[in-house]
Image (cartoon, helix red, strand yellow):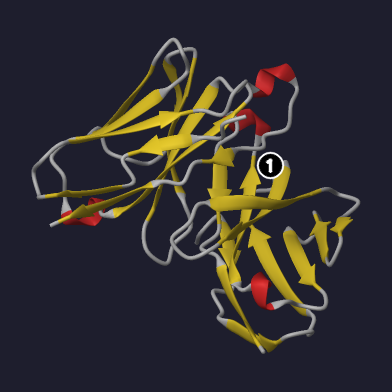
Amino acid sequence: RKEVEQDPGPFNVPEGATVAFNCTYSNSASQSFFWYRQDCRKEPKLLMSVYSSGNEDGRFTAQLNRASQYISLLIRDSKLSDSATYLCAVTRYSSASKIIFGSGTRLSIRP
Amino acid sequence: DAGVTQSPTHLIKTRGQQVTLRCSPKSGHDTVSWYQQALGQGPQFIFQYYEEEERQRGNFPDRFSGHQFPNYSSELNVNALLLGDSALYLCASSPNPGTGGQDTQYFGPGTRLTVL
């Protein structure tokens, strides 16, 4: 079993829709949680860090559920430019910042 | 402020050859990590360098080695290339976690390696 698991998708939704992704992690020692966005053939770019209290950045909301060991990403009012692969990632402080990524969820927004 | 830079952008090699990839970290960062991303997969941690030493290593064979220089730049070397080594190789830099900063890593644009 992979340490971080995501639904690979693809999610194909109309512009303006709300879409949500979940990600599960298996190691309860995980301490930091992130969502990265990766465009085709480009490097991952940090979208949001995810904290225990959850956090929001414009149309994006991330939540962490430590008890169930999953994190989520909600995108409201989706735009064509949101089309990308979204990577869930975790780190454990004791492992000196090694990032463990999921395989990514592909999102395609259609006009 | 320059971000993370990597060279070359693309590389084509044949099986059995050796390759060296280069990375310069973001200004102010002293820790460099390398990741391998195969098509359709998330990046996989190879190793991390700090103070010119390998601090942690992922599940990669000894064919993968690295180096960090006093100016914090880093190299990734892969010997005896296999077809399965074809991937996007990403370098990421961060401040030393011991400084109390977040474990936020900033990625370079990557080097796309094709092994024929």
What residue do we see at 33% from left, 40% from top? B60
What residue do we see at 12% from left, 57% from top? B116
Residue nearest the observer in this picture, B90 or B10: B10
Residue nearest the observer in this picture, A78 or A22: A78
What residue do we see at 8% from left, 43% from top? B16
Residue A26 seen in render: no
- The amino acid sitting under disc 1 is Ala
Chain of the residue where label 1 is placed in the rendered structure: A
Q: In this view, does B50 lie to the left or right of B103?
A: left
Above or below, comparing residue B23 to residue A76 in the picture? above
Residue nearest the observer in this picture, A44 or A34: A44
Residue nearest the observer in this picture, A32 or A58: A58
Number of numbered discs on residues:
1
Residue occupied by mark 1: A29
- Give how far across and how far down residue A27 sits, in percent: 63, 49
* In the image, farthest residue toward the front: B1
What residue do we see at 68% from left, 44% from top? A30
- Give how far across and how far down residue B14 sits, in percent: 10, 50
Residue A47 seen in render: yes
- Give how far across and how far down residue A64 sits, in percent: 81, 57
